[in-house]
Image (spheres, rainbow, N blue to C red):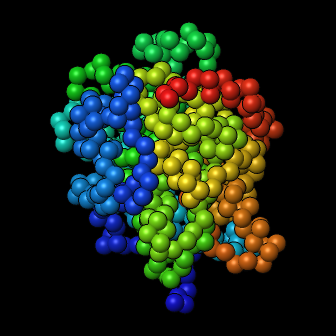
C-alpha cells in the first residue's frame, strides 16, 4: 500500500474501539497473582472489592477474557478527546537526518494533559454505578490526580488526592487544576493518616514517593464509608483501560499499511507503556508479527534495569497487596527527580513478566539527557513534552540516530503521553543549570532490597 501518509493520522468516531484489550489473556505464562499480605494467598475478588470497585476488582483478576466491552457512558466521554492523533514526525526525521520513520501517539489533547484520563473516567464510572460517594487516590507529577478529579467531577463524585510532597511543591498549577475540578489535595506524606505519620517519623523531611502516597490513599479509603481507592498505574485494570492507546495506534498504522519495527514508551508503574504495546504484543504472542519493545525509565529510579524480580508491597506503608514485580523495594525513596510520574519503586506485574521472559527491553536514562531531548523535540515538533514522555523521546531519537549510522530504514513508534506546560519549574532548573543526574549507589539500592519480603 502506497498511500501518502499525512502529518497527523486521525481516526473518526466509528473507528474508536468498542472494547479494551486484556493483554494477560494472550500470555501463556501469566503474571503472578496479587497476594493477601496477611495470608500470603492469592487475593480473591471479594477481598479486592473491599479496596476497589466491584467491577474493577473483577477486571483485576481476569486473565482469560481477551476483550472487555467499554461501557457506552465511558465511550461517549472518550469521544470528547478521542481518537487521539498518531503523528508522523516529519520535522524530527529531517532535523536528525535519519532514514528512520518516526511516529508518536499524542495523548495530551485533553485538559488533564495526559493519557491518564483513559482509565480515570472508567474507574469513576464504575464507582458511580456502584453508588459510591467518592474515591481516594495518589498522584506523582499530578497528571493522574488531575484526570481523576475531572472524571469525578463529570460523575458527581468526591475526589481526595494525596499528592507526592515534592510534586505538590514543584507543581502548584497542576494542584490548582485538581482543586478547580473539586478535588481535595493533600501533600504526602501527611499528618492526616496513621501511615503518613509513621513515614514522617521514619523519614523526617522526606519529599515523599508514590509508594507513600498510595499507602495514605488506601488507608483513607478504608476509613470513609462509601469510598473506594483508585490507582492510576501498576494495576492490571489500568493497563486494560490504557489499551485503547495501542489499539488506536495499530488501527492508524494499519490504515496506511505501516508496520512498526520498534515501540518505545516511558515506564514508571507501566500504564502508558502497557497500553501502547498491548495489541502489538498480543499479535507477537500469537506468532503473527515480531516487534522490539523498549521501556525507558529514569536512572534515578531504575526498577527494571537494576531491580529484583520478587514479590513486594505496592506501597511504602505496606498496607496494600503484594505483587510480583521488578522492584527496588517498597522502602526505596527515589530522589526528587522532575519526572514525578516515574518515581515508583516497582513495575506492573504484566510488564515485569514480559520483561523477565525476554519479550521486552529496558533502558535507564539520565535526567539532564532527557531534558535535552525534550527541548530539542519542542523546538522541532512544536509540542512541549512532559518530563515523563521525554524519556521515550530520548530513546526514540537515539534509535533514529543509529539508523542514520547504519542506513537502516526502521519504523519507530513512541508514546507522547502528555504535555509539560505544568512542568516549567523543571524546565527552569534545566535551563539554569541547576539540574543534577542523581543515580542511586549499590549501597542505597541494597537498603531497599533488604526490605523485600522473604516469602520462600
Q: Residue furthest bottom?
A: 2
Please report the residue visible at 53 percent of the width from the left and 36 percent of the height from the top.
310
- Residue 218 lies, with reference to residue 113, above or below; the image says above
Q: Position of residue 81 (x, y in %)?
A: 39, 59
Residue at (67, 75) in percent of width and height? 410
Please indicate whether residue 341 sits to the left or right of residue 31 in the image: right
Across and down, in percent, residue 75 comes to 28, 58
Q: In the rendered image, which quarter is residue 342 located in?
A: top right
Q: Which residue occupies 23% across, 34% down?
A: 46
Whether residue 153 is visible, yes or no, is no
How many numbered discs sit on the rendered protein?
A: 0
Q: Between residues 443 and 343, which one lies in front from this camera angle? A: 443
| Image coords of residue 134 (percent x, y) | 27, 31
Q: Determine the image quadrant of residue 41.
A: top left
Residue positioned 71% across, 26% down in the render: 444
Vertical placement of residue 437 versus 114, above or below: above
Of residue 359 and residue 59, the one placed in the foreground of this image is: 359
- Direction from residue 25 to residue 49 in the image, left or right: left
Measuring from the top left, give residue 67's x and y in whole percent: 30, 61
Amino acid at each position: 500500500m502506497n498511500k501518502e501518509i499525512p502529518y497527523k493520522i486521525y481516526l473518526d468516531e466509528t473507528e474508536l474501539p468498542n472494547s479494551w484489550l486484556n493483554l494477560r489473556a494472550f500470555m501463556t505464562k501469566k503474571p503472578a497473582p496479587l497476594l493477601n499480605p496477611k495470608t500470603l494467598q492469592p487475593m480473591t475478588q471479594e477481598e479486592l472489592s473491599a479496596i476497589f470497585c466491584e467491577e474493577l476488582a473483577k477486571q483485576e483478576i481476569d486473565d482469560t477474557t481477551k476483550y472487555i466491552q467499554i461501557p457506552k457512558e465511558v465511550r461517549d466521554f472518550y469521544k470528547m478527546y478521542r481518537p487521539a492523533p498518531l503523528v508522523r514526525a516529519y520535522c524530527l526525521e529531517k532535523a536528525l537526518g535519519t532514514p528512520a520513520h518516526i511516529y508518536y501517539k499524542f495523548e495530551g489533547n485533553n485538559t488533564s494533559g495526559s493519557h491518564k484520563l483513559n482509565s480515570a473516567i472508567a474507574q469513576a464510572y464504575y464507582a458511580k454505578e456502584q453508588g459510591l460517594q467518592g474515591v481516594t487516590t495518589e498522584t506523582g507529577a499530578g497528571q493522574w490526580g488531575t484526570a481523576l478529579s475531572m472524571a469525578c467531577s463529570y460523575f458527581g463524585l468526591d475526589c481526595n488526592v494525596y499528592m507526592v510532597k515534592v510534586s505538590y511543591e514543584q507543581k502548584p498549577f497542576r494542584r490548582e487544576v485538581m482543586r478547580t475540578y473539586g478535588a481535595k489535595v493533600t501533600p504526602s506524606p501527611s499528618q492526616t493518616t496513621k501511615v503518613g505519620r509513621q513515614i514522617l517519623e521514619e523519614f523526617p523531611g522526606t519529599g515523599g514517593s508514590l509508594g507513600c502516597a498510595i499507602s495514605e490513599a488506601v488507608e483513607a479509603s478504608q476509613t470513609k464509608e462509601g469510598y473506594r481507592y483508585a490507582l492510576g498505574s501498576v494495576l492490571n485494570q489500568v493497563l486494560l483501560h490504557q489499551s485503547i492507546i495501542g489499539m488506536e495506534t495499530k488501527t492508524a498504522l494499519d490504515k496506511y499499511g505501516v508496520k512498526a519495527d520498534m515501540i518505545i514508551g516511558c515506564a514508571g508503574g507501566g500504564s502508558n507503556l502497557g497500553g501502547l504495546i498491548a495489541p502489538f504484543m498480543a499479535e507477537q504472542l500469537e506468532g503473527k508479527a515480531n516487534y522490539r519493545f523498549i521501556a525507558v525509565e529514569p536512572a534515578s529510579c531504575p526498577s527494571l534495569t537494576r531491580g529484583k524480580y520478587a514479590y513486594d508491597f505496592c506501597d511504602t506503608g505496606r498496607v496494600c497487596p503484594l505483587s510480583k514485580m521488578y522492584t527496588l523495594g517498597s522502602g526505596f525513596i527515589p530522589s526528587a527527580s522532575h519526572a514525578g510520574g516515574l518515581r515508583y519503586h516497582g513495575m506492573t506485574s504484566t510488564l515485569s513478566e514480559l520483561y523477565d521472559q525476554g519479550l521486552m527491553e529496558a533502558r535507564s536514562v539520565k535526567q539532564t539527557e532527557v531534558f535535552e531531548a525534550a527541548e530539542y523535540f519542542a523546538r522541532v515538533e512544536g509540542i512541549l513534552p512532559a518530563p515523563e514522555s521525554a524519556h521515550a523521546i530520548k530513546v526514540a531519537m537515539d534509535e533514529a540516530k543509529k539508523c542514520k549510522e547504519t542506513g537502516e530504514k526502521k519504523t519507530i513508534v513512541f508514546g507522547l503521553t502528555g504535555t509539560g506546560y505544568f512542568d516549567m519549574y523543571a524546565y527552569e532548573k534545566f535551563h539554569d543549570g541547576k539540574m543534577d543526574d542523581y543515580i542511586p549507589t549499590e549501597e542505597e539500592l541494597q537498603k531497599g532490597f533488604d526490605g523485600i519480603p522473604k516469602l520462600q
